Image (tube, coloured by chain):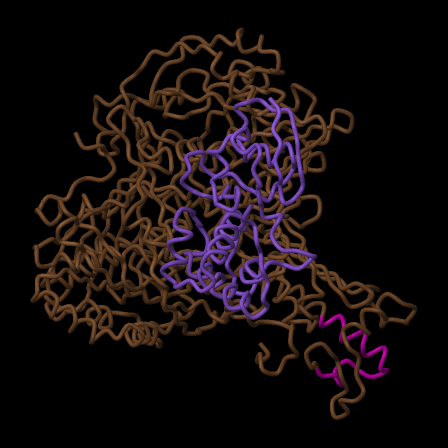
Amino acid sequence: MTDVKDKPDGVGFGRVTRKEDARFVRGKGNYVDDIVLPGMLYGAVLRSPYAHAKIISIDTSEAEKHPKVKAVITGALLETLNLAWIPSLSHDVIAVLATDKVRYQGQEVAFVVAEDRYSARDALELIEVDYEVLPAVVDAKRALEPDAAIIRDDIENKKDNYIFDWGSGDEQATEAVFKKADVIVEQDMLYPRVHPAPMETCGSVADMDPISGKLTIYCTTQAPHAHRTLYALVAGLPEHKLRVYSPDIGGGFGNKVGIYPGYVLSVVGSIVTKRPVKWVEDRSENLMSTSFARDYHMKGKIAATKEGKILGLRVDVLADHGAFNNTAQPTKFPAGFFHVFSGSYDMEAAYCAVKGVYTNKAPGGVAYACSFRVTEAVYAVERMVDRLALELDMDPAELRMKNLLRPEQFPYTSPTGWEYDSGEYPRALRLAMDIAGYEDLRKEQAEKRANGELMGIGLSFFTETVGAGPKKHMDILGLGMADGCEVRVHPTGKAVVRLSVQTQGQGHETTFAQIVSEVTGIPTADIEVVHGDTDNTPFGLGTYGSRSTPVSGAAAAVASKRIVEKARLIASAMLECAPEDLEWNLGRWQVKGDPSAGKTIAEIALAAHASLELPDGIEGHLDASCVYDPPNLTFPFGAYICVVDVDRGTGKVKVRRFIAVDDCGPRINPMIVEGQVHGGLADGVGMALMESIAFDEDGNCLGGSFMDYLLPTSLECPSWETGETVTPSPHHPLGLKGVGESATVGSPPAVVNAVLDALKPFGVKHADMPLTPAQVWRAMQGRPMRTDLAIK
Amino acid sequence: MRVNMSVNGVEVSDEIEPRLLLVHFLRENLRLTGTHWGCDTSNCGTCTVLMDGMPVKSCTVLAAMASGSQITTVEGLGANGELDPVQQGFIEMHGLQCGFCTSGMMLSARWLLDHNPNPSEKEIREAISGQICRCTGYENIVRSIKWAAAHSQNSGVQQGVEA
């Protein structure tokens, strides 16, 4: 990589404002609900009011009589099209419209297509559904009891609610280190069900052209190519008759990875009515039916010497997957990357066991910037390390420093087989402590405690696991997790780069242009990024799991390097010298020893399209492409410190400071990286203190609107304090690691550890998220509650 | 029923259902899609517009209630082809990512600066506290509004939106 100082302005990495902002600040973004096609109709979904009920009958006759209704679609109609059920992303099925029974509150039962948005909603009221209510299975811990209602009786011979058992690590070796440990600490922890809740809900506009037979789906998808392949497989349509177009997306966070029944219903609606059909869900539909996150019931057990050397860790998980197993993650890993749970610490052995169960709740599980469940893993280990510190009466920073992996251990193979690419962990923790003024904070805390005030300081150190992933290990529904990229330099030296990934706010139109610019020397402003449209981009699996920079960014870098190499050969023909006699001076090939003789990339591009006789084997034009199959994942990391004040009388937590040191390798655009970190920190504060999708005993969702599902505002968030270290990835062509989810993964345990540190005078050892005033107050009274079920 | 209002300085008149929400009137009848919709319950504030100079959540205002009013949407920010300092501030300080909450945030910021040209950080945070952003963690929105405050005074731009 060339040093930023050596480069002309507007070339390569560095802080530049975003290209996409010009349209957004003028209100000229193009989101799915902004799309209006000639003759377009509107769809609305009738949803189940019950968590578990048999459908006795559905009467749509009154709805069909509504003067503005064009079609009413039920599961019975979908059965005739073989579309009532579609494959899930985890080798299960999901119901598009319920045919036999409903399995969670909010499940899709019927679909109305009408001339306008309001009429479609009106007609839902005219559909009569007769249900026979069944007992709901709401608690994952009760799902496997012999008398629990069977949720998935659609599966032949299914007699329980069991999905899978999966483990990783060496169980016997882990048991052996527990036998020799001086100290063993055990802790039950719930990572409650939460929801990504992007500001834009999910939606689609389907347009089946009855003449050409081509189906265009404008859709809120983070993975347009994966969606197209799934539609092709389900509908039996060839890819060239399918175009998935993902326009501007109003936030994704994993919520927009999967294929939802509403998307399929807009397609069926368009086929039935022969007109374009728009479906956009409302906020309650989004919170109640689309992909949730977490819902992990974890039992942790950590072993150490009395001096504080961690020996081993075991975590047993009960994973609540809802009514259909529809988590989006690589096939081989039913618990995602949870088995990176030994985290950032050197230990002899580790073992995790995960059991998945069905419940009468919405399906999903992998979402909300979780890096395929690294969030749950980091929470588990960081809480266990704090519990150990409490047991040993040791400062949690000192305990972490004592056990962090040392720089010379990299590349490091974890007890469960991950190969961490690079890291300088102690340096990051020291920097975070310096920014925080850690010693002074502890002094202040001691003084406050003496006065009866509750101040807490919480740490977390995380190792992220992103850039999925090597094709030989990782696929989703059989599709390897590689990504394509095409770069074309126009005759005038301007360029276009086509991506398989799709931004939801991460700023790809700017950062991918910067990647190409960094390698080719073409100014960022002269590089156009095309993405989101399957008709105009190469195949790839999309944007989630912080994979865009490590996978697609690598593809863009390699394709750009191929451009530069081809340019060298063309320059040699132009300058009538051997390619070996040329040296690259960012943006220009010049003769070694005679820098005045050279050709810029723009001059070379024009020559490549002109009449110049090119060397043997070199075709004209200046294009290159790459399909990047990453050799390994990348492992960004960071050290976070949170400072809270807790109100003794009300239990209210105020996050006073939050210090975040992130190492994601070199930063393409420091402004954008910092923005990504800020957003994730707000997520962490929200999850730790406010957010929970809870249920009552009948399976009624208690987090179905923003009045009940609380998100942090500007008043709950402090002014974030950030720092950075730079440890490049040895295998990424530009050393980049990715950062999208780092802060969401790393911040929740820092907040929780801080609150529990504040509550130390009460002897509180643990309380589950969200640490609402009620939960904190109860913890002070010695009886923290279970947060995922309604209190009876 | 018929409604008449001034939207971004242009007089509009339309025949509507009485139940039509202002957000849908703006987005669908007038095709001003810069105003977004996010929750239906007045919690998220992505639909915020200025009605007679005051920020309102247009998902909980009937178009009929807005009849006779002056409405300013994001499309009405800035003048003579120049961006409002608030818009420029959001670009300069990375006050947006996905862009979905941005229109509403900028209109609240405009209102704040019209009434308080030199707001403190606390005043800025309070002014936008009825609006949710899932991307930025708010820090850069605060910085964007500070940037706009600093540059409004220097440029002497007056963005009067009140009736």
**Does the segment drawn in magenta span residue A565?**
yes
Residue A285 image position (x, y, % from top left) = 44, 31
Q: Could you say which chain is coloured purple in the image?
A: B
Residue B5 image position (x, y, % from top left) = 61, 35
User: Which residues lie in the magenta part?
Assistant: A564-583
Q: Quadrant of the C terminus of chain A?
A: top left
User: Would residue A187 be seen by someone viewing this image from the given angle?
Assistant: yes
Specify the farthest residue to the front.
B163
Location of residue A604 with respect to A529 vertically, above or below: below
Q: Quadrant of residue A9?
A: bottom right
Location of residue A355 with respect to B150 vertically, above or below: above
Q: Identify which residue, B95 or A243, lies in the foreground.
A: B95
Q: Residue at left 49%, top 52%?
A: B111
Q: Quadrant of residue A408?
A: bottom left
Location of residue B75 with respect to A38 vertically, above or below: below
Question: What predominant SS class does the magenta segment belong to?
Answer: helix
User: Would residue A165 be seen by someone viewing this image from the given angle?
Assistant: no
Q: Residue at left 29%, top 26%?
A: A699
Q: Colour of chain A?
A: brown
- B143 horizontally vs A611: left or right: left
